[in-house]
Image (cartoon, helix red, strand yellow):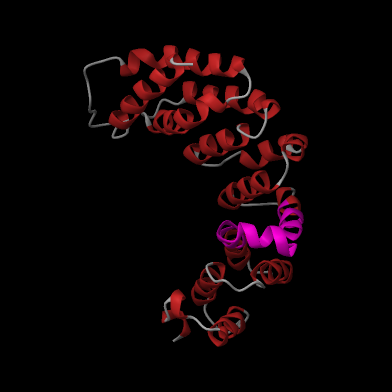
């Protein structure tokens, strides 16, 4: 069966068969979604245009969901080609429209990340209120990661999203998972923060949370992320002091 052929061994005829099968309404949704996944990992130059067209034509939510995801996966693996062949413009338009549509929380996470990745800092800033609407209801760890990614695009976006992330961290009472993510991301990003006031804000949060991690405890049975958070807390603290 086509779906069992390793991606490294697919031929143009296999790809054609997969395109035919994802449009076959007699196939189960599970199988059609498998072929969308496979095509998103292929080198077929028609994926972006065909996925966008299929999204506009299908009425099946599960297929729409897969196409949103598959389109971004293909983009991530073919950034250079897409910039050259004109598909980048089609992607920008696609995700710009999706940003203002009704989405599930998982779709919203993919769409916001894709929109922010593709658009200029100015376009992201001008749409940040709609971005914030789509972020409502997204799982907290995804939310923190997304807001930090967006913040790194410009000083104006730092001003919106760094304080927002720190507020989320202070409100979180469910262990050290969000701290761990924040410390790991900020370890790489700290020296690239464009506004010195936000470096100070990060340092202020480190001082605020220090009592939690300034202990001899290295493990908490009810907080499996504590050990990693503590490790990266001290690594970020060291970086923040070596400016």
Task: Identify the residue at image location x=51%, y=30%.
Answer: 189
Residue appearing at x 42%, y 32% in the figure? 184
| 82, 209: nearer the viewer | 82
Instruction: Kindly identify the residue that appears in the image at 32 percent across and 25 percent down.
Output: 230
Magenta-colored segment: predominant secondary structure: helix
**Could you tell me residue 193's position as x and y percent?**
58, 25
- Residue 83 colored in magenta in the image: yes
> Which residue range is magenta in the image?
71-95
Residue 181: percent from left, percent from top: 43, 34
Q: Nearer the viewer, residue 102 or 8?
A: 8
Say if the magenta span includes residue 23: no
Q: Position of residue 120 (x, y in %)?
A: 73, 41
Asked whether 120 or 130 is in front, the reply is 120
Query: 144 or 81: nearer the eye?
Result: 81
Across the whole image, how many numbered discs are drawn on residues?
A: 0
Q: In percent of the image, x 51 and y 41: which residue is there?
A: 142
Picture layout, residue 99 above or below residue 27: above
The answer to whether any part of residue 35 appears in the image is: yes
Left or right of residue 122, residue 134 in this image: left
Residue 165 in view, yes or no: no
| Direction from residue 226 to residue 88 in the image, left or right | right
Name above or below for residue 66 compared with residue 19. above
Quarter holding residue 183: top left
Q: Quadrant of the N terminus?
A: bottom left
């Amino acid at each position: 069966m086509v779906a069992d052929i390793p991606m490294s061994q697919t031929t143009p005829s296999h790809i054609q068969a997969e395109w035919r099968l994802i449009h076959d309404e007699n196939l189960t949704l599970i199988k059609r979604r498998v072929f969308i996944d496979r095509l998103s990992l292929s080198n077929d130059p028609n994926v972006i245009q065909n996925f966008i067209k299929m999204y506009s034509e299908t009425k099946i939510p599960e297929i729409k969901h897969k196409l949103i995801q598959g389109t971004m996966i293909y983009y991530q693996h073919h950034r250079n080609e897409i910039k050259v062949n004109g598909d980048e413009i089609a992607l920008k338009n696609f995700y710009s429209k999706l940003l203002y549509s009704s989405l599930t929380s998982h779709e919203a996470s993919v769409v916001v990340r894709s929109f922010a990745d593709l658009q200029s800092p100015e376009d992201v800033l001008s749409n940040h209120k709609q971005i914030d609407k789509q972020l409502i209801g997204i799982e907290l760890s995804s939310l923190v990661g997304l807001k930090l990614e967006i913040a790194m695009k410009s000083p104006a976006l730092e001003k919106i999203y760094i304080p927002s992330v720190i507020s989320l961290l202070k409100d979180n009472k469910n262990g050290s998972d969000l701290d761990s993510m924040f410390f790991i991301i900020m370890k790489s990003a700290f020296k690239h923060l464009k506004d010195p006031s936000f470096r100070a804000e990060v340092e202020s949060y480190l001082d605020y949370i220090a009592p939690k991690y300034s202990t001899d405890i290295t493990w908490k049975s009810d907080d499996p992320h504590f050990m990693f958070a503590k490790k990266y807390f001290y690594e970020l603290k060291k970086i923040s002091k070596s400016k």
